[in-house]
Amino acid sequence: MKLTTKGHYAVKALLDLSLSPLNQPISVNKIADRQHIPAPYLEKILIQIRRAGLIKSVRGSQGGYQLAMSPEKISLGEILTAVGDKIEPLPDLDNTANSPEDWVTITLWKRLNRKLKEAIFEISLADLYYDARSRQADLGEGNNFIV
């Protein structure tokens, strides 16, 4: 699995949205400024995430984006899939290997692929939020939330 810049920015943006008090909408520019992401690129990413149903957009002067559900219900895997990151770390492997060694190796990689995919979909946005807050507290930082 390769985490792309787009996937990295998507996770940062959704973590930023998870901080919004009472799930108030946050503008693209505010998220982009706080997370040091180019706003036009972030807008494209957020559109993809909105289409996946993980966030909602609110129009108007007080508009922006907000989570469509609680952070506990949004997985890392869903975020990465929404922006097109591939969860499968290896290409499809041929199960018709001739030697026992090849078969064992292929079986091993398939098991590892499955476990990695399970782990990615078990990690929630809330888990990431608490990890980031814990790290922030360790560093003695205030409420600036930059991932």
Image (cartoon, helix red, strand yellow):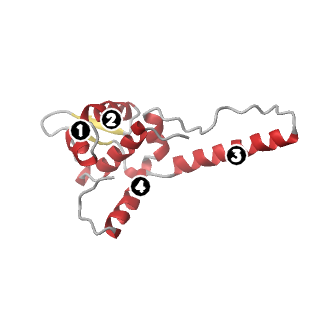
Q: Position of residue 24 (x, y in %)?
A: 22, 47
Determine the residue located farthest toward the right in the rendered image: 99
Q: Position of residue 125 (x, y in %)?
A: 41, 51
* Res 25 seen here: no
Are the residues tagged 2 and 1 within 8 Å (C-beta)?
yes
Which badge, 4 or 3, is on the more N-terminal residue?
A: 3
Image disc number at residue 28 = 1
Residue, disc 3: 111
Image disc number at residue 46 = 2
Residue, disc 4: 128
Q: CA distance from mark 2 to mark 1?
A: 8 Å
Which badge, 4 or 1, is on the more N-terminal residue?
A: 1
Q: Is residue 81 left or right of residue 107?
A: left
Screen quadrant of the N terminus: top right
Q: Position of residue 21 (x, y in %)?
A: 23, 54
> Mark 4, residues whose alpha carbon is within 10 Å: few (<14), some, or many (≥20)?
some
Amino acid type of disc 1? Val
> Mark 1, residues whose alpha carbon is within 10 Å: few (<14), some, or many (≥20)?
many
Name the residue: 81% across, 39% down.
102
Amino acid type of disc 2? Leu
Which badge, 4 or 2, is on the more N-terminal residue?
A: 2
Which badge, 3 or 2, is on the more N-terminal residue?
A: 2
Q: CA distance from mark 4 to mark 1?
A: 21 Å
Q: Secondary structure at mark 1?
A: helix
Q: How many marks?
A: 4
Q: Secondary structure at mark 2?
A: helix
Amino acid type of disc 4? Leu
Are the residues tagged 4 and 2 within 8 Å (C-beta)?
no
Determine the residue located farthest toward the left in the rendered image: 61
> Mark 2, residues whose alpha carbon is within 10 Å: few (<14), some, or many (≥20)?
many
